[in-house]
Image (tube, rainbow, N blue to C red):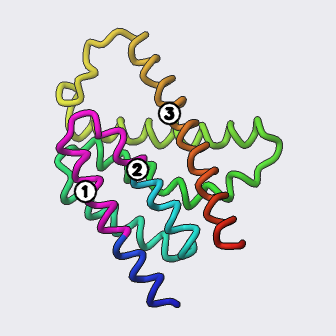
C-alpha cells in the first residue's frame, strides 16, 4: 500500500508541476494555477496523509520555482500552497468567526509576505502596482480574500467527498 501512495504522490506532483508551469505561460492563470495545485494537494492529503503531503508540497514548490516563468505564480504556491495541509487543524477552531478570522489572518499574512518579498526582489515596476490608486489595491485585496474563501469552501467539500468515498 505504501508503494501505491508514493506512486500516487509522484504522479500528482508531476501534474501539479505542469499546472504550475502553465501558470507562467497563460497570463491570468498565475492566480488560478496555485489554486488548482492546492486542490491536487487536498487529494494527496486525504489519500496519502500529511507526512507524504509535506514531501509533495516541498517537491512541487521547489520544482515550480525552477520551471514556472512567472515568479508571482510560483510565489503564490510557495506561500499559500501548504494551506490544504494546515486546513484540518484550522477547521477545528470553534466558534466559526474565530476559525475564519484565523484563516484570513494566515492568508493575508502569507500574501503580505509574498508581495513584500516580490517588491524587494523584483521592484514595483515589474509587478505593475506602482502608481495604482489605493482603492484599486484595496479592491484587489478584497477580491483575493473572496477567492480564498471560495477556495476554502471547495477544499472542504472535496475533503468531505473523498472521506465519504474512502469510508473514513
Q: Nearer the viewer, residue 26 or 109?
A: 26
Which of the two labelled residues, at mark 3 and mark 2, occupies the earlier sequence position? 2
For the C terminus, the quadrant is bottom right
What percent of the width, then of the height, locates residue 87?
A: 62, 54
Locate residue 160: give its quadrant.
Answer: bottom right
Depicted 38 relative to depicted 12: above or below: above
Q: Main secondary structure of the magenta part?
A: helix
Q: In the rendered image, which residue does mark 2 sit on?
A: 36
Left or right of residue 80: residue 33: left
Left or right of residue 9: residue 18: left
Give the number of the disc on residue 147: 3
The answer to whether mark 3 and mark 1 are in CB contact below 8 A is no
Residue at 76% x, 35% y is 97
Residue at 54% x, 29% y is 146
Cα separation between marks 1 and 2: 16 Å
Instruction: Report helix, strand or loop for mark 2.
Output: helix
Q: In the rendered image, which residue does mark 1 sit on?
A: 65
Identify the magenta region: 12-35
The answer to whether mark 3 and mark 2 are in CB contact below 8 A is no
Between marks 3 and 1 in the image, the one whose residue lies nearer the viewer: 3
Depicted 95 relative to depicted 162: above or below: above
Q: Nearer the viewer, residue 116 or 30?
A: 30
Q: Residues within 10 Å of mark 2 (few under 14, many from 20)?
A: some
Depicted 119 relative to depicted 140: above or below: below
What percent of the width, then of the height, locates residue 116?
A: 35, 36
Instruction: Report helix, strand or loop for mark 3.
Output: helix
Locate residue 29: give its quadrant.
Answer: top left
Q: Residues within 10 Å of mark 1 (few under 14, many from 20)?
A: many
Amino acid at each position: 500500500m505504501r508503494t501505491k501512495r508514493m506512486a500516487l504522490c509522484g504522479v500528482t506532483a508531476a501534474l501539479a508541476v505542469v499546472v504550475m508551469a502553465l501558470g507562467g505561460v497563460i497570463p491570468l492563470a498565475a492566480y488560478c494555477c496555485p489554486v488548482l495545485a492546492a486542490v491536487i494537494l487536498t487529494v494527496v492529503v486525504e489519500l496519502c496523509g500529511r507526512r507524504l503531503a509535506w514531501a509533495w508540497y516541498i517537491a512541487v514548490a521547489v520544482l515550480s520555482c525552477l520551471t514556472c516563468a512567472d515568479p508571482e505564480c510560483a510565489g503564490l504556491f510557495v506561500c499559500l500552497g501548504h494551506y490544504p495541509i494546515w486546513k484540518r487543524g484550522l477547521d477545528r477552531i470553534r466558534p466559526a468567526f474565530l476559525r475564519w478570522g484565523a484563516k484570513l489572518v494566515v492568508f493575508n499574512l502569507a500574501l503580505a509576505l509574498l508581495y513584500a518579498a516580490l517588491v524587494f526582489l523584483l521592484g514595483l515596476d515589474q509587478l505593475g502596482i506602482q502608481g495604482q490608486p489605493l482603492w484599486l489595491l484595496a479592491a484587489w485585496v478584497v477580491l483575493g480574500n473572496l477567492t480564498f474563501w471560495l477556495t476554502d469552501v471547495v477544499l472542504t467539500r472535496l475533503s468531505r467527498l473523498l472521506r465519504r468515498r474512502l469510508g473514513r
